[in-house]
Image (cartoon, helix red, strand yellow):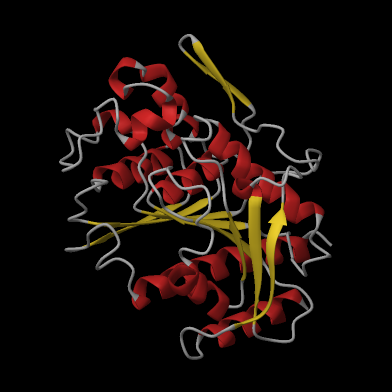
């Protein structure tokens, strides 16, 4: 039955781009603390299905925004709705609210929440995807590579990658597929890779995220690096990056892709000639590639489930 549903998803995705959602819930408090940075929206695609596979959609803000959950709804979100996916659009704490790892704690709390409340919001959480752009791409990638990691130590610094945000801590925060749109990975080499923004500066977005100048806090930077946690058990990745990105150089995505492949992981890297930080990258053909990727992984999850019966 589920395999038939995926065929329906594929047919939906071939319809006109930019369809409207059929139902939405706004300002859901996923942490139970009534903070704006812990609110999220859920959108269901047009159609008559009883349940929909969710994709958590993370905005880019250089980790400086805590209330931008609707930012990518008309671009990435519309493409996902067209493809038959439910879109989960959360806020998260900014670096002004709290330094890392607060941000990844919030995203994992979102995943746990939608698993706990799947029936209420018509979600099929046998599959959970995550997509994000820029700093949202970083958090998406980190969600994927650290999905089985709770505590981790680099040098003299330790970090809890799971957190205890919200009341759904008995549910899993593991996810099945990641689409990383030009997200940073190894902050320490961004300047040497050709960025026009000085990331080594103590006031850079990356320095603000970890609470100090990145070159003077290398262990903390390593804990925020998705590559640190790469292993053969990581989820499937699709990574898209413009070759002329002036803010997050494409070496960041190349390094993540190479690390995933080296350990036997599943990763596809799409380098977009002339693409910049969104412009030339946020194009319909690449939105379609994202949708097809998520559909492929979702189908594989369903097939695996059918085989186990």
> Between residues 42 and 300, which one lies in front from this camera angle?
42
> Between residues 220 and 238, which one lies in front from this camera angle?
220
How far from the left and from the top, in percent, is residue 206?
35, 33
Q: Residue at x 46, y 68 (%)?
A: 76
Q: Residue furthest top?
A: 156
With 251 as the anchor, is 259 left or right in this view? Answer: right
Report if residue 265 is visible in the image: no
Give the image quarter of residue 283.
Answer: bottom left
Q: Residue at x 54, y 45 (%)?
A: 144
How far from the left and from the top, in percent, is residue 169?
78, 38
How far from the left and from the top, in percent, is residue 304?
70, 61
Q: Is residue 167 above or below residue 225?
A: below
Give the image quarter of residue 4.
Answer: bottom right
* Number of disc labels: 0
> Between residues 281 and 253, which one lies in front from this camera angle?
281
With 126 as the anchor, is 193 left or right in this view? Answer: left
* Quarter of the figure that contains the N terminus: bottom right
How far from the left and from the top, in percent, is residue 115?
76, 54
Report if residue 159 is visible in the image: yes
Q: Residue at x 32, y 32 (%)?
A: 187
Q: Is residue 203 above or below residue 124?
A: above
Give the image quarter of residue 295.
Answer: bottom right
């Amino acid at each position: 039955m589920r395999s038939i549903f995926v065929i329906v998803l594929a047919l939906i995705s071939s319809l006109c781009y930019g369809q409207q959602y059929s139902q939405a819930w706004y300002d859901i408090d996923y942490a139970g603390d009534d903070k704006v940075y812990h609110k999220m929206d859920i959108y269901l695609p047009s159609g008559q299905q009883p349940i929909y596979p969710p994709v958590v959609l993370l905005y880019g803000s250089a980790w400086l925004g805590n209330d931008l959950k609707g930012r990518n709804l008309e671009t990435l979100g519309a493409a996902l709705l067209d493809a038959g996916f439910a879109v989960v659009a959360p806020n998260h704490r900014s670096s002004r609210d709290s330094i890392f790892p607060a941000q990844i704690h919030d995203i994992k709390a979102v995943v746990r929440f939608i698993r706990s409340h799947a029936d209420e919001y018509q979600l099929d959480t046998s599959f959970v995807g995550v997509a994000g752009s820029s700093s949202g791409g970083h958090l998406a990638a980190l969600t994927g590579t650290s999905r089985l990691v709770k505590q981790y130590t680099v040098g003299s610094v330790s970090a809890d990658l799971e957190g205890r945000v919200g009341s759904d801590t008995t549910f899993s925060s593991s996810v099945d597929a990641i689409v990383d749109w030009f997200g940073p990975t190894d902050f320490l080499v961004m300047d040497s890779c050709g960025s026009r923004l000085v990331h080594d500066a103590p006031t850079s977005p990356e320095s603000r995220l970890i609470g100090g100048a990145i070159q003077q806090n290398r262990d903390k930077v390593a804990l925020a690096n998705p590559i640190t946690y790469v292993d053969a058990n990581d989820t499937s990745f699709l990574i898209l990056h413009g070759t002329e990105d002036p803010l997050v150089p494409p070496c960041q995505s190349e390094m993540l892709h190479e690390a995933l492949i080296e350990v036997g992981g599943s990763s596809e890297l799409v380098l977009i000639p002339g693409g910049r930080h969104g412009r030339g990258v946020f194009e319909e053909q690449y939105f379609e590639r994202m949708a097809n990727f998520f559909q492929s992984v979702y189908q594989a999850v369903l097939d695996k489930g059918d085989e186990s019966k």
